[in-house]
């Protein structure tokens, strides 16, 4: 998009008056913060209007104002729901098969079959312990990886360029980006030469797109060529990437593994209940003692429950997670291993986004007296 003469004039006029007060800035001091009009699209408005909406200028905002806006808008990061560790552990005791195992534990205690009680209880706790431990360690590994990959941004604050963490950016900040930088927030490009931006993480298109001054660039993109300043207009979950990530986080799906285990558990529960009901009915008709009936119910319940199945499945997937960890692949959820293992065909029309997106040179094919080096030289000169 090419800027109009009115936009250029507005920008130059804004720089000439950068020491003056914007009307939005006055309103911000009176009301506690600039709030962009949600009915207006800041990525397409004229740049001068965006500055007024944000209460900013080509000189950005002050450090004090940035701290106020950080409280107002929140950190420039995708909020993650942190699960309580105790609730995560207790979730392993909830489900059709755990219910059946817990019922067997209770019946064993009531009847005084302490050997069965200990064995079944150990298997139940082992299943929960293995699954919780593996996913907890994976969570810590991912947190450490995120800390290592945390990026910083070059920001103009109080007339000086500083490099705070990108999570501290706020709408109205003026940032500077150069080749290789990750765009830290949604921003509008200021004056300068066009830049090449890799948006493959957002659009799937592996080839970089040319962005001109005045156009919008989105968080998560990468500057492939050029250097330019930009005005931040959206951060955190308000960015294009943040809204997409929020939609993904709200989509809760049940894996094939979980569905299969649920079907097995539901079938076994129904079968065990039907047989226990039959035993109780027969015992009542025969006049058997209640304790004898409970013993039969316990034997049937234990026989119907695959007591070791959850533990075997958890240990098997834990071994797979350890193997993947040696190949620098972090498994955040154990059931994801089985889900990916069940993939027969993976279709993709954007190979560049699945690989390093770098071309490699194969073995040159030469005829006659022409050498491979000559073929490469001629290709380079062409």
Image (cartoon, rainbow, N blue to C red):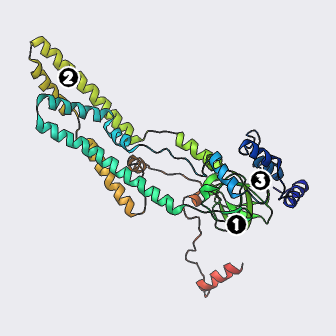
Q: Nearer the viewer, residue 331 or 381?
A: 331
Q: Name the residue carrying label 1.
A: 161
Q: CA distance from mark 2 to mark 3?
A: 73 Å
Residue 289, disc: none
Q: Quadrant of residue 176?
A: bottom right
In space, the residues marked 2 and 1 are separated at their CA atoms by: 75 Å
Query: Secondary structure under badge 3?
Result: loop
- Look at mark 2 in the image and give the residue it sits on: 276
Residue 330 in view of the camera: no
- Give the residue drawn at x 23%, y 30%: 103
Residue annotated with mark 3: 56
Question: Where does residue 126 sit, x and y in percent of width and height?
Answer: 25, 46
Mark 2 and mark 3 residues within 8 Å of each other at the beta carbon: no
Q: CA distance from mark 3 to mark 1?
A: 16 Å
Mark 2 vs mark 3, foreground winner is: 3
Which quadrant would the C terminus be assigned to in this image? bottom right
């Amino acid at each position: 998009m090419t800027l109009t003469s009115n936009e250029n004039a507005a920008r130059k006029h804004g720089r000439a008056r950068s020491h003056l007060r914007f009307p939005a800035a006055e309103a911000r001091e009176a009301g506690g913060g600039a709030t962009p009009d949600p009915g207006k699209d800041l990525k397409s408005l004229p740049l001068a209007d965006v500055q007024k909406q944000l209460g900013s200028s080509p000189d950005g905002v002050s450090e004090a104002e940035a701290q106020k806006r950080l409280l107002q808008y929140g950190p420039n990061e995708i909020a993650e729901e942190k699960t309580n560790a105790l609730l995560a552990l207790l979730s392993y005791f909830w489900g059709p098969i755990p219910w059946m195992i817990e019922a067997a534990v209770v019946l064993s205690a009531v009847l005084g079959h302490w050997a069965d009680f200990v064995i079944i209880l150990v298997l139940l706790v082992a299943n929960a312990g293995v699954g919780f431990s593996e996913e907890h360690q994976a969570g810590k590994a991912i947190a450490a990886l995120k800390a290592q990959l945390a990026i910083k941004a070059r920001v103009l604050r109080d007339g000086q360029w500083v490099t705070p963490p990108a999570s501290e950016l706020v709408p109205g900040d003026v940032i500077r980006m150069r080749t290789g930088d990750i765009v830290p927030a949604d921003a509008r490009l200021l004056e300068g030469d066009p830049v090449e931006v890799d948006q493959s993480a957002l659009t799937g298109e592996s080839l970089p797109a040319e962005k001109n001054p005045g156009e919008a660039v989105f968080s998560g993109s990468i500057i492939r060529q050029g250097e330019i300043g930009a005005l931040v207009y959206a951060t955190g979950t308000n960015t294009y990437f943040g809204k997409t990530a929020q939609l993904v986080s709200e989509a809760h799906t049940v894996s094939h593994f979980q569905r299969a285990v649920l079907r097995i558990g539901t079938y076994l529960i129904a079968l065990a209940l039907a047989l226990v009901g039959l035993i109780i009915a027969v015992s009542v008709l025969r006049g058997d003692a209640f304790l004898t009936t409970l013993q039969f119910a316990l034997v049937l319940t234990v026989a119907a429950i695959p007591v070791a199945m959850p533990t075997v499945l958890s240990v098997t997937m834990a071994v797979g997670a350890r193997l993947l960890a040696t190949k620098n692949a972090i498994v955040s959820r154990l059931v994801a291993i089985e889900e990916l293992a069940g993939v027969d065909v993976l279709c993709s029309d954007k190979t560049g986004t699945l690989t390093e997106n770098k071309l490699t040179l194969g073995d040159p094919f030469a005829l006659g007296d022409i050498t491979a080096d000559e073929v490469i030289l001629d290709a380079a000169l062409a």
